[in-house]
Image (tube, rainbow, N blue to C red):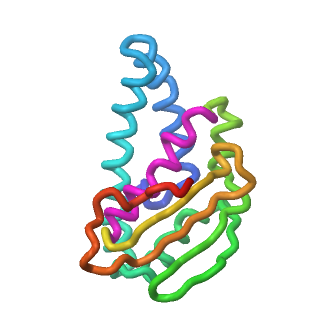
Amino acid sequence: MSEQATLSLLRQREIEARIVGPLYRAFAKEIGEARTRAIIDGVIRELARESGCAAAQRVGGNDLAKFAEAKERWREDDALSLSVIRQDDKVLEFNVTRCLFAEMYRALGMQELGGLLSCSRDAAMIEGFNSHIQLTRTQTIMEGANHCDFRFKVRPDDQPSEGLIGERRE
């Protein structure tokens, strides 16, 4: 087992934030905040897609039931409190009611980076896990809401995946 696998996801994100945060600030001074955010966002999304593929391999499948298993890694160290609203073979809906990831970024003075370094991973991760599963989320604790609303559903096979994954409802 690799050392990375022995760390909880919360601890991994903390280590990453302590490295990326100062780099982000230095690059933002040199090339501007918008360009820095765009570059980091692209890297984070690619890493998240790879993580989704690895999660599917780790749990031995990529259907919604297996994703429900894989998401338990997010809860290690009691990092998330959540309430499941609906779970079947086509839909997984839950609310995150407490997020230690958001609390950790705030404690580090990096709340403005929390969404970029953590929340923005979710849509790309599910794309890597299974491109036929769609994530809709309209709010996050990281952005100041009282809960995160995760809604996953299996799309029909004939529906294209581009533009749907992670699309926000207004």
Nearest the viewer among 149 and 60 is 149
Res. 8 in view: no
Determine if the magenta segment contains residue 113. yes
Nearest the viewer among 162 and 17 is 162
Res. 17 in view: yes
For residue 97, what is the image quadrant? bottom right
Kindly report the secondary structure that dominates the magenta region of the rendered protein: helix
| Residue at point 39%, 61% (across, down) | 165
Q: Quadrant of the N terminus?
A: bottom left
How far across and down, in percent of the image, does residue 117 sit? 49, 42
| Residue at point 49%, 78% (across, down) | 69
| Residue at point 39%, 11% (across, down) | 30
Outermost residue to the bottom: 89
For residue 130, what is the image quadrant? bottom left
Look at the picture and state if 16 lies above or below 96.
Answer: above
Q: Please report the bounds of the magenta region as a residue range.
A: 111-130
Determine if the magenta segment contains residue 70. no
How far across and down, in percent of the image, does residue 119 sit? 52, 50
Outermost residue to the front: 170
Look at the picture and state if 80 lies above or below 38.
Answer: below
How far across and down, in percent of the image, does residue 169 sit? 53, 57
Q: Is residue 84 left or right of residue 113?
A: right
Nearest the viewer among 50 and 127 is 127
